Amino acid sequence: MKFIVSSTYLLKQLQVLGGVINNSNTLPILDNFLFDLKDSKLTVSASDLETTMSSTLDVESDEDGSIALPARLLLDTLKTFPEQPLTFVVEENNTVEISSNHGKYALAYADGNEFPKSVELDDPSTTTIAGEILATAISKTIFAAGNDDLRPVMSGVFFQFSTEGLTFVATDAHKLVKYTREDVKADQVAEFIMPKKPLNLLKGILAATDDAVTIEYNDSNAKFTFENSVLVCRLIDGKYPNYEAVIPKENPNKLTIDRTQFLNSVRRVSIFSNKTTHQIRLKIAGAELNISAEDIDYSNKAEERLSCDYQGDDMQIGFNSRFLTEMLNNLNADNVQLEMSLPNRAGILTPVDGLDEGEHVTMLVMPVMLNS
């Protein structure tokens, strides 16, 4: 088998696929890319058994064949080439020879048939969504997903599709993000939990594409098809917690404030907070918000005053500054609203502006107990 391909074009595709490969694989074959050549189309795949991704490239060739090439070695070599055509030729002695303008490089290959086959989805449901919308939905929610191996359902993002719209939810029990699109609808109701790794891969690729993404899914797997790529992954098994039950409905105290100003203040004050609790205190009275933090062990403390728009009773509430910073960072509004009921009930953060028609973001952050 022999084919000719542009070095930078191949590198670009392989760098994306390289994100699938784990640093330590149980099966040695998974340290390779699968090259499958058919009718001058080269399909390159990478897998970690849970997630398999493949891209199809146009190459010059009139042969067919399938081989597995070492991923790390190939990527390291391709990174050093300027743009030029590379010729790959499979030799008799189980090596592939790559010829560039200036040299020849031989690397051992494995039989392509040893590579695990991608899962075929039986009787899947299908939804099509714009790549940009899916990328936004992922980046708005994924940071809130948990890392707890004991609660695997919370370590992914919950996809909820219905004829009214699409909802994406992530939570780690301390913070929760719900992202809804009413301008995109599915044909039938479906729910599944996507693991983080394939979502991070999709987020990176889809941010740069205008293409539509076709999502096919059944009870155990999901398949994303876009441009010249396909990603198949195993879903997280289990029932997602009832997140609607934890979002407080009655929140009479409403604080509206400039997002950047609030974020910068929280960042500065939190430097002086306790290094284990990261606790900051918000004291709201009239049109003034007082943000303070104290680390008693080291006698460090800080306090800032901001003007805000506030309707409600005077109150004091404590938050973990890291969660608040992450959430404010993830919104691109000029002004945000923080709704609260009591100092021991969750606060709800929403953007006041900067959203598309039919787009909604609700962020919930649990308070921390204040030591008076």
Image (spheres, grey):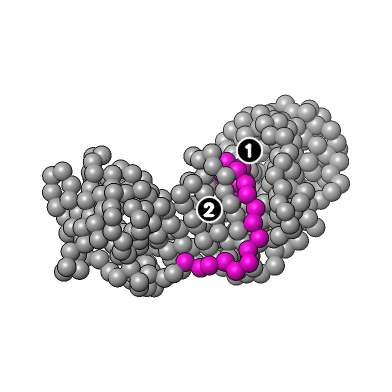
Instruction: Identify the residue shown where x is 62% and y is 30%.
Output: 260
Relative depth, front residue between 204 and 243: 204
User: Is 65 left or right of 345, judged from the image as shown?
Assistant: left
Instruction: Identify the residue shown where x is 57% and y is 66%.
Output: 121
- Name the secondary structure under disc 1: loop
The reply to whether the C-beta atoms of the residues labelled 1 and 2 are less than 8 Å apart is no
Q: Quadrant of residue 292?
A: top right
Instruction: Identify the residue shown where x is 63% and y is 63%.
Output: 124
Q: Which residues are magenta?
A: 118-142
- Name the secondary structure under disc 2: strand
Residue type indicated by callout 1: Leu
Reading the image, the residue beneath label 1 is 331
**Which numbered tag is attached to residue 225?**
2
Distance (Cα) linking label 1 and label 2: 28 Å
Relative depth, front residue between 264 and 275: 264
Residue type indicated by callout 2: Thr
Relative depth, front residue between 368 and 243: 243
